[in-house]
Amino acid sequence: MFDFKVVADWLNELLNGLMPSWLATSIECVIVAVFLLAAYSLIAMAYIMYERWVCAWIQCRIGPRRVGPWGLLQVFADVLKILQKELITLWSTDKFLHKLAPYLVLIASMLTFACLPWGKGMQFIDFNIGVFFIIAVSSIGVLGILLAGWSSNSKYTLIGAMRSGAQMVSYELSCGLAVLTVVCLAGTMNVTELVEAQADGWFLFKGHVPAFIAFIIYIIAANAENNRGPFDLPEAEHELTAGYHTEYSGIHFGFFYLAEYLNLFIVSGIAALLFLGGWMPLHVPGLEGFNAVMDYIPSTLWFLGKAFFMTFIFMWIRWSFPRVRIDQMLALEWRYLMPIGLFNLVLMAVVVAFGWHF
Amino acid sequence: MDLSIFGIQSTTMAITAALTGVLLVAAALIIAWLIGPRSYTEKKGEPYECGIPSRGDSMAQFHVGYYLFAILFLMFDVETVFLFPWAVICGDLNTSALPAVGTFLVILALGLAYAWKKGALRWK
């Protein structure tokens, strides 16, 4: 399997031979930044198209077809349109916080985006506390959403932001517990080590029953954390017009939309990392030929494929279930998911302590 | 340990990623500001509340229900922080890891049960 580290090391030596090391490091940082920007916008566009196609398919509609072949250029048209819109600032808003909120949301999603396992040797941020860092920075997004709703000084945005805040912090606990269960099994928080630990089998298959329960909990909690699916009360359109971003216009609104789709990719990517082996190919012990064939598929394709598969599940859930009420939403988290998550953690600790996993 | 791609410190990379996010927002805002129209009317600056004239300020006192959940969240979030280091070395500790963390989790579960009994989890 192709290792990106070889290319990176070669480039690093080349640059260090040509110029002082501080300049080489700066150039490498710029390369990473350009890659992140390109990947971020491409995946956002791909996801908007993907959602519209899947949604149309599930609802037996045709979906976008007019702009370009199979409607492929629809997203570009939308981006151009939204860039041309006027940026309206209300006289009653807190102007500084109103402008700050999109930055916070985007910074949170960009940081988590860079932590994902993009391929073999392609790990942009590789802390030894990897997944913990991901959980930590993803909560900056809640701050951005709360600020957006509060600073807009409109009742709908305030209610939307409060709902969103309550929902996101509540379900963050279940997400954290599901991640904790996997960390307990793997014995590491480093993203690279987590992926390498799954070389002989993904954690979903390795971890026995608790890993499977954690996977289900993670899917539900991640859906709620993204304000999607049956848990989209923060922007329940017939109650609150558009929730916390009602008062944002043009590209200002576009940032929240962008971050929402990117967060969908990020939670799918984390699910792929923790349960489906990150960029690790599917290996079945004993089938040497099969494993060798699987190794030929590039690692980045494996990661993207798993993330897109997970996203399909999220979209399926979104278009299949009716929206829940706020009391049902909070009861589901605090009365069911939380206690089950805690119990599941103990179960995993027992499984690990007695060595019952594969 | 903390070295990322190109052998750069992960902290540097994290700062780079954060700056990339700032750059993306700033660049898009500048483009929108350059090509977008600008106009001002008095009505445009009012909050959108479905066409009904808005009454009063919305930065007012707010429902205490959200506050209770925030407090509960704080309690369990700190608990997660305590559990992460334990989870990393759980495999090395073998069976001796169980009683200690079991006690901790039982106390936490009692806390959740107390909040439940008191009706903090009921939406009013």
Image (cartoon, coloured by chain):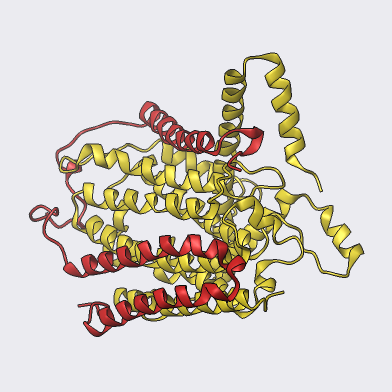
Chain colours: A yellow, B red
Residue in front for this viewpoint, A340 or A100: A340
- Residue A86 shown left or right of residue A81 in the figure: left
Residue in front for this viewpoint, A267 or B110: B110
Quadrant in the picture for residue A51? bottom right
Residue in front for this viewpoint, A156 or A292: A292
Task: State the image coordinates of residue A177 (x, y, percent, origin top left).
Answer: 47, 68
- Residue A320 shown left or right of residue A324 in the figure: right
Task: State the image coordinates of residue A302 (x, y, percent, origin top left).
Answer: 72, 55
Image quarter where the C terminus of chain B lies is: bottom left
| Whether residue B25 is situated above or below residue B49 in the rendered picture | above
| Whether residue A268 is situated above or below residue B116 in the rendered picture | above
- Residue A287 shown left or right of residue A172 in the figure: right
Image quarter where the N terminus of chain B lies is: top right
Q: In this orientation, does residue B82 appear?
A: yes
How many labels, in total? 0
| Residue ID at (15%, 43%) | A92
Task: State the image coordinates of residue A296 (x, y, percent, origin top left).
Answer: 84, 52
Considering every residue shown, the one lying at the far right of the view is A289
| Residue ID at (67%, 56%) | A195
Considering every residue shown, the one lying at the far bottom of the view is B117
Considering every residue shown, the one lying at the far top of the view is A19
- Residue B23 shown left or right of residue A188 in the figure: left
Q: In this orientation, does residue A322 appear?
A: no
Considering every residue shown, the one lying at the far left of the view is B56
| Residue ID at (63%, 44%) | A123
Quadrant in the picture for residue A21? top right
Residue in front for this viewpoint, A144 or A119: A119
| Whether residue B16 is situated above or below residue A204 in the rendered picture | above
| Whether residue A346 is situated above or below residue A76 in the rendered picture | below
